[in-house]
Image (cartoon, helix red, strand yellow):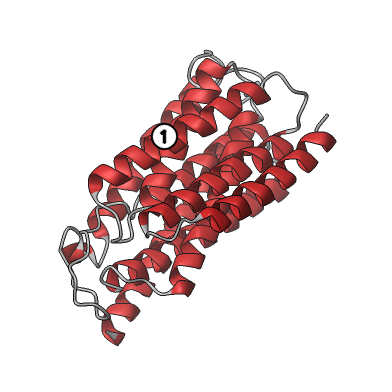
Amino acid sequence: MVIARERAYRWAGVIAVLAGVVVFLAGLFGRQIDIDPTNVPLISSDGRFYYAAAVILTAVFAWTVARSEPDRELVGRVHFSSATGEPTYPQGATGWIVPAIALFTAFLHMARYFDWIWLVLAATTTGATVFLACVARHHNVRAEGAPSRNVRLGRLTLTDFVAFVSFATIYGFKARTLYSGTMILLLAWLLLFQLLDDGTSSRFQRDIYSAAGAIIVAEFCWALNYWNASPWQAGVLLLIVFQVYAGLALAHIRGRLDQRALAQQLGIGAAVFLVVAYFAG
């Protein structure tokens, strides 16, 4: 177990450094070209090469993470709970999702803010996020379908952070819902899918719950496009919707959703949403 943990931590460090270096180089490249931040990425001709390169690099990075994962032999296996002895659902190959989304979000962010301070901040934050995501993935897989409370809380917090930054960054382009809503739909679906991949739900459940949640988040993105909200305000509002749904979905799958939990999640989420929406104008 100790050897496996050390190997996973070394792997996470290498992947994190790789992500940070790639983001830094992308920022240097972005400083050399003139990208209009009001244009739609890939759709508008301005900066199309940069965005195309970002998509390709993200795909290659995701493939690298998935293929080099040290715990890959445990993916897809049926484990037995140490507490009850009952079999758990096999976990899928979802370890690449959070690192890839973190990298792609950094690329999008660097297209709009490529000053030196933003360049260094984006590179270090992306590297740290990727490292934590890889470490959390290791502990989640090694938990054999019964991750501890700290592991679950860590994965949820990290997923929320990535969701917030990615939603805010995409909304910041102020693109039509056809583009921004579709992108947020895809990212929300991936983030929810990997969050539900903890051995407590079947593949069918993960597909249904993540798709439904992604549609809900995308619908709120459509509504936000009619408001004069800043990117960070919109990111917080979309994160609240994402978090409330994720909490309800996880509780329902684990059989812990009752009237009290439902009222608590919806009440707190609605209160925070209304406060942020009020200050967003």
127 or 268, nearer to the observer: 268
Frontmost residue, 164 versus 237: 237
Indicate the amino acid at tag 1: Ala
Helix, strand or loop at label 1? It is: helix
Residue at left offset 48%, top offset 28%: 183
- Residue 228 in the figure: left or right of residue 63: right
- Where is residue 14? Give x, y as percent: 39, 65
Residue for point 59% across, 58% down: 124
Q: Residue furthest front?
A: 259
Q: Quadrant of the N terminus?
A: bottom left
- The residue located at (20%, 60%) in the rendering is 75
Residue 192 in the image, given as x and y percentages of width and height: 42, 46
Label 1, residues with CA under 10 Å away: few <14, some 14-19, many ≥20: some
Instruction: Kindly identify the residue that appears in the image at 36 percent across and 63 percent down.
Output: 137
Is residue 280 visible to us here?
yes
Which quadrant of the figure contains the C terminus?
A: top right
Look at the picture and state if 125 lies above or below 209: below
Residue 36 lies, with reference to residue 28, above or below; the image says: above
Residue 15 coordinates in the image, percent (x, y): 39, 60
- Quarter-wise, where is residue 234 in the image? top right
Residue 134 lies, with reference to residue 65, above or below; the image says below
The residue carrying mark 1 is 212
* Image coordinates for residue 68, horizontal then vertical, percent: 25, 59
